[in-house]
Amino acid sequence: MEQTIQNQKKWSVGGGSWVTADVYGDPDAPGLVVVPGAMSDAHAWRHVATAVDAWPSVTVVNRRGRTPSGPLTGGYSLRTEVEDLGLILDECAGTQALFGWSYGGLIALLAANDRALRQVIAYEPVIRPFGSHVLPDLKAAEEKADWEATVEIVNRRIAGLDAARIEALRADPQGWADMRRLSRPAYAELAALNAVPAPHELARRADRVDLIVGQCHHGTAPYGTSFDDVRRLVTRAEVHVLPGQGHVAHLQAPAELGHLLNGLAAAR
C-alpha cells in the first residue's frame, strides 16, 4: 500500500541550526531513514518514499542548508553531517534500515562506522576526489551568489550533461528555479567531501550493506568510478544495478527505485 506523509519532525543540531524530516507511514514505527545528497531535498524524494512499503515508516531527512531545515553554519564539515544523522537515528530508535543517495550515501556509510545498524543501502555514493576539479569555480560562483553559474558547473562539469540537455532543464522554469535554490550549499558540501582523506573502511558496524549503481553509470566517470572507489572500502557489500537509470533515478524512475528498495528489505 502506498504510504503518505503523516508527520514532519524537527531537531535542533546546535550552533543555531536544525534539521527536519518528512515521515511517511506510521510515524511511531521504526523503519527506513533516507538521506538525500547535494542538489536535492526531502521533497525531491517524495515519490520514492510513497513507493516504498516494505517498512512501516519512511523518514526522509532534509539536511541542513535546505528549507525548512537550518543553515550550514560556520565550521560545517562532513563530520557535521554524520553527527546530524546520528542525532536523528537516536531519535528514530529502532531504525531498521538507512538509505543514502550520492553525498547522502557517503554520510550513511560513515554513520555505520560510528554505530551498529541493521542495514545500510547507498545509491551511487560519492567520495574524495569526486568533483574536486571544479571547487575553485564553485567557490567563485558562491562568492558572487551566482546560483545560475553554480547549477551550470554542477550539471555540465560534474554530471557531464551536454548543452542540449542543459537547455532542456532550463526550459522548465520551476525546475530550474528549484535547482538554483538547491545549489546554494553545493560548494560547501563538495569542499567538505574533499577536505578529509577517505577512511580505510566504510560501514564497519552494519550487519548488511547494499550498494546500488545505475546501469547508465556502471564503470563510467564520474559517478560510476566514484562508486567503485566506495565499493573498495565496503568489500562485503552486495552490489545491485538499477537497469536503464543514472544518478537521478529518484526523479526519473521513483517507482523502480522504490521497488528495488522493497526487494532489499525482503533480502534482509
Image (cartoon, rainbow, N blue to C red):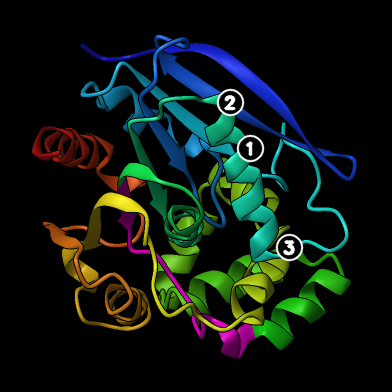
Q: Quadrant of the C terminus?
A: top left
Q: Position of residue 73 (x, y in %)?
A: 85, 53
Other-residue count near label 3 (Cα within 10 Å), few / some / many at <14 / 14–19 / ≥20: many
Quadrant for residue 45, please give it: top left
Residue that label 2 marks: 91
Q: Is residue 36 magenta?
A: no
Segment colored magenta = 120-134
Quadrant for residue 196, please give it: bottom right
The numbered mark, 2 or 3, whose residue comes first in the sequence reads 2
Residue drawn at 60 percent across, 53 percent down? 82
Residue 118 to residue 199: above or below: above
Q: Which mark is residue 87?
A: 1
Marks 2, 3: nearer the viewer: 2
Residue drawn at 65 percent across, 50 percent down? 83
Residue that label 3 marks: 147
Q: Is residue 185 left or right of residue 133?
A: right
Q: Is residue 123 magenta?
A: yes
Marks 3, 1: nearer the viewer: 1
Q: Quadrant of the N terminus?
A: top left
Q: Nearer the viewer, residue 102 or 107?
A: 107
Q: Is residue 216 left or right of residue 50?
A: left
